[in-house]
Image: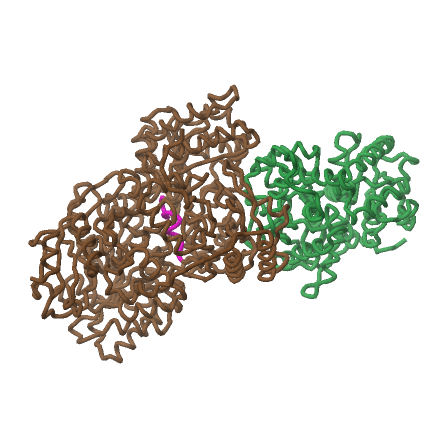
Chain colours: A green, B brown
Amino acid sequence: MAYNAKIARNIKPLFEYRNDAWKCIRCGMCRMTHPDFLQSHKYSDCCPRNIKHVFESYAGTGTQEIVRALTCDPPELEIDDYLKKIIFTCTICGNCQEICNAVKDLEPANAMMALRNYIVNKEGPMPAHQTLIQSILNYDNPWLSPRAARARWAKRLRDVNIKEAGKDKVKVLFYVGCNESYVSDLIPVAETAARVLSLAGVDFGILGAKERCCGSTALRTGANEMFEKYRRENIEMLNGLGIQTMVTACSGCHSTFAHNYAGDLKFEILHVVEFLDRLIQEGDINFEKELPIVATYHDPCHIGRYSQIFDPPRRVLQSIPGVNFKEMERIRQYSLCCGCGGGVKTAYPDLAMETANLRLDEARDVTKADTIVSCCPFCENNLGDAAKSREDHKFRVVDIMQLVAESMGFEKGKD
Amino acid sequence: MSVLSDRVGQLIGKHKIVTDPQAVSPYFDGEVAEAKVVVTVPASTEEVQELVLFAGKEKVPVYTSYGPLLPAKLAASDGIIIDFKKQNKIERIDKRNLAVHFQRGATFEQINQELKPHGIRIMTPVAARSEFAAECLINRNVSKAIAKFSEMAVSNLKVVMADGRIHKTGTHSISEDGVDFREDAGPSLSKWYYGSEDSFGIVTRATVYCFPCMEKRLVRVFSFDRYEDLIKAMHEVPRLEVGQEYLGMNARFARSILKKDKAGFPKFMLVVGIEAFAELADNENEWVEKEVKKRGGKEAREWEKDFLDIIDIAWKSASPNHLAYFSAYRNNLKLRGLVNKSLQEARFPESEVGECLVSVCRGRNCYSMFDLFPEGGKADTDRLALQIFQKKAGAFFDLPQGNLAWEVYKSIPGYRRHLRRIKQLMDPEGILNPQVEYLFDPKKVEKSNFDIPPLTQETLTEAVAALKKAIGDQWVSDRPADLSSYGHDFTVVTGQRPNVVVLPLNTKDVQAIMEVAYDYGLPVVPLSTGFNHGGLTLPRHGGIMVDLRRMTRLVEIDPDSMTAVIEPNVKMRALWMDCHKLEEEYNTLKPILPMTFGSISLLANYVSRGGAGSAAKYGPNAELIVDMKFVLPNGEVLEVGPNSVPGTDGIAYQYGPGPEIAGMFLNADGAFGICTEMRIKLFPELKGERILGAASFVDDYTDCQNSCNTMYDVCQDNLAEYTYKFHPGILAAGTASLVGADPLNVVEVVPKHFFLALFSGLDEKQVEIRTKRFEQIAEKYGMTVIDPATLGNPDLAHNDQMKRSLGTRGNKLTAYRGSFQWLACYLKVEKVPEIAQQWKQQIDKYWRPADPKFSIEMAMSGCGIQGPMPFARGGACEFDWWWDHGNPDTIKRAAKIVRKAGELQLDHGGLFIRNLHDLGEMQLSRWGVYTEIFKRFRKVMDPADLMHPGVIDFKTEFTGKKTE
């Protein structure tokens, strides 16, 4: 399928989306699970914020209308808190654009990013996002954590040879990302990735305290200028490392480097699951332990729809002995967002939680899975929070790397 | 002679009246000793007009002979009986479009005799209640072929109204030369006359659909020992779409209908009629034999000749003591048991009970008839029917009479009141058939008087608060950012933002909203999934936008009756997917979807009278609706359709009891209420399938005609389940998006006329038989057969757009230049070559884009036919064009071309599919009596003019003036 506009890339100023806004025919396909992949009425909706709020304004069509109204002379809408809510409840999952691309060639998700930037330029970031933005500026990460703590996890892995990129010459840079570096539940993902890379004999290193936020959070919450600053500085630093490949364990970092730094990085960018898939295909990975689980895979928007990485995680999962793999209905490029992205988990946690629960309902009813697997720290965090709050069906929400670690016999926290 | 007979004699001639009690008696259900009533035999519609005018002036009742005999007591009072036996001319036969126009007094025998030389005929009933064909057909006497053709056969009527005026119904309102189509320019009010027993107006002429007499006509007869096996075969075999008539009967009925007194009839018989071109008929015959035998039937060939002789003539009611009802097959045995028990209690001998069963609409339901022959003694079938109804065991009585009628009509909340409202409107003095008193009682019609204060900011604030209280804070918004999305669409129509938007969850919420609307005088505009095409869901005067998308329940799929119950936000493709999972032996199930986006509400499309490319096989969408639930302007809920009668279950017939009032809600753009639930028919999705096209590369009149003739022959051979005649623009846009090209680069190389069809069948052999026939037809008209499967792109031969609504395959029609626009009307297919040429001239004159490629671009616009009606009796003729909504110059031209397109279509007797682009006013101005009825009825239903006011401008006096 040919796409004219990729999701969340090459975002133009708001006024350049004005003509598109007039061309929207309100067909409503953007609210719907992609018709070519739709399997049932029950799972026929795809837009998290529209599922919850329902008004047309909370859909791709509404986005076009808001663009139209704001770009009229004089504007037909005033920027108020409610308008901001409409705009910032979007997870920028890109589902609307994925479908519209095939119908009308419009870019509702990209227009939404332009709208956010327009609002932030006029009125500053959303209060709930202010802390994230400030933390990135102060600490190079959104978690208010010191730079020095970024690579603490690596120091505990004494049996793994992790080089210091920049100081040591390495072919592969493992770009850990803010989540896997600081969030305790996600640190095992970084550990496993490092062990796998090491076991496979990959010459790799990390940046340690010198690693900085990729800027994704700033970009998704409308702080484009700040993102530009990080992009510029990161490009300069990363290109100076002389690496051949960058591997990330974070889907947000991956899509930001792969698409929003596009063309300016002089090395290959892979998500760790792609790397792992390659290693499995080449016979470099041996699984030792059977995992008797029923697992389903949740496609994260950033490596799924944004980056078209659909098969590697599925191949990896299916290669783990004992795993009974089942698919949900809304999968691959038409996967339902977990509800976390675009700063929604921070600004509208209820929406994030409700959406995650919808996704878990689908997993329960369609697959009867006991394990939800993903490749994105945001998805795992959000789906995990929802799973913990449920009584009806016990789910384990894990990163695919954690399953790999278990099957390969790595023990959690082992030095 | 009485004074009345004297004066009536002066009006129409003394030789046309009868007053002698002996001669009058046959019109009554008992002996007439003294007759004050005058029997008239007018020779023309004009004379009927004279009689009705006279009756109105003198307040004398007018009786017609629509079927049942009149109560004898009426003979002793003043009254005029109209007998139509002298009005029996066949006025016109339209062989090409398969219609016959005949006067009310024509009989089936007479009509079919005259049609015979033309190789066509009309379908005949299984139990005619009148000798006159029109009376049987208008009052829905069940056709023997209802298993295959469940659509009502009458398209247009000529009616003498109570005030003496003539109402030509449906498309005849605008022209008798246009398509013969029963739908109206706005809501289908003309349908009121069907099943109304002449109570709203007196029908003097009918236009009835004919059917081609095919190459081969067969009748197969099977015997059954067990009733259970018989009904199993009648239920299951028709859904394989083989055979035309499925008539089950017991020995007593068979003896009566064949008029053979000899013994030796099997206990139960199944008579299956088959009609098709020879090869297909033979194939269907094999299937019927195999499948009926599988279900316990044994060949009974000795009866086949007898039944072949009578299958195409009208069967009269076998006995005057006749009981009939529809039921789901699952309730059939239970109901039969109840009938038999009652008969036993009444000591009526079983041997004198004739039973006849008719399989309805592909075996969805069974129409069960019991004839109690006089040899068995006295029998009160009216009482029996009432008993059955009161058991609430699933029986549906289509046209109840006597006490049963009282019970049926009063059992549906609000139903009688609305029938009375219509009666009051159409016959305020109550002179037409007043003996139908159980149905109509004009004196009791309530008067409405609304005095609503003007809307102010203060009252609006109060109204919003009331709405929030009624349905919850979070589902009501008057915030500009929410309202903005509902204020305009992508067409040339300019609307207004609503004052408030509400999201009801259920019917109760909608009722609460309507109450607030009437309390505060706020206009109400309904919307379902939001594809605001052509301004039909745009507020013109603000008010409450009722966005129904929280009503998302797929309430039920009933595989037994092949129906589904849906709420407004069931997306059409989602329903298709759920139905498609229901695997049966040879098929799955499917809803019939129009060629629009899969995201769109099927309920909204049906209620706004959408059409499908597969109408050729399944009929127009309006005929696929079974039941509807409406919230009326006064907040009351009205259910229409057979299952609105408490106690019915699984009825899949498209008509409710008595007059057909459901039509008034179709194509009404919310004028009479908001639809919150709908039961629709599903159909078998057969497994064999192939898509083929027939192309012509010459852009002239003759080639267009050849393409249309191909369509006629394909449809009249009943070959395809989907057909579309493309013009180059739509073909280029569709093809280009499949192959990733620019439509402008493709438009000059695609065929100028392209007829596409999808052929399906139970197996590959059936498909092959159909496609072979298609190839012969295409060759006959010099068309080149194209198999899209051989063109290298599987999407070109994909059935998505034909069956599952628009997904993404080939669906960038709307992307080119911004907005894709269309205007379509129902038209005779034979008129398309002429209108296509004139449309080209209009395009040349009024549609000149500044683009230097304008000559190519103009070729993009054209005239196609999407979804001809069954047998190509009419087609949805569509003009398409593309324009840039961001360009003010194009907008001006688009506005002009929209009106020009509308005028052209109306000038050719076209009926707009919908009143898009604010063209309703233009259309309605030409519809005379209908428009006046519409306007008056709207005042009855919505006295405060709050239901989507302005979508059709009722307050303007229409002039019909053309645009300059």
Name the spot of residue B139 as percent of width and height, x first: 26, 57
Q: Is residue B878 above or below residue B603?
A: above
Name the spot of residue B934 as percent of width and height, x first: 36, 49
Quarter occupied by residue A247: top right
Q: Nearer the viewer, residue A290 or B361?
A: B361
Name the spot of residue B425 as percent of width and height, x first: 32, 56
Residue at 22 percent across and 47 percent down: it is: B121
Q: Is residue B630 above or below residue A105?
A: below
Q: Is residue B543 left or right of residue A238?
A: left
- Magenta-tinted stretch: B616-626
Q: Nearer the viewer, residue A71 or B77?
A: B77
Q: Main SS of the magenta segment?
A: helix
Quarter occupied by residue B31: bottom left
Q: Quadrant of the N terminus of chain B?
A: bottom left
Determine if residue B717 is in view: no
Q: Quadrant of the C terminus of chain B?
A: top left
Q: How many marks?
A: 0
Residue at 38 percent across and 44 percent down: it is: B721
Q: Nearer the viewer, residue B333 or A352?
A: A352
Name the spot of residue B305 as percent of width and height, x first: 18, 55
Q: Is residue A411 above or below residue B915?
A: below
Q: Assess whether residue B441 is covered by the magenta stretch.
A: no
Determine if residue B286 is in view: yes
Q: Is residue B505 left or right of residue A198?
A: left
Residue at the extreme top of the image, as rendered: B852
Q: Is residue B698 left or right of residue A206?
A: left
Q: Assess whether residue B623 is covered by the magenta stretch.
A: yes
Q: Is residue B893 above or below residue A172?
A: above
Quarter occupied by residue A204: top right
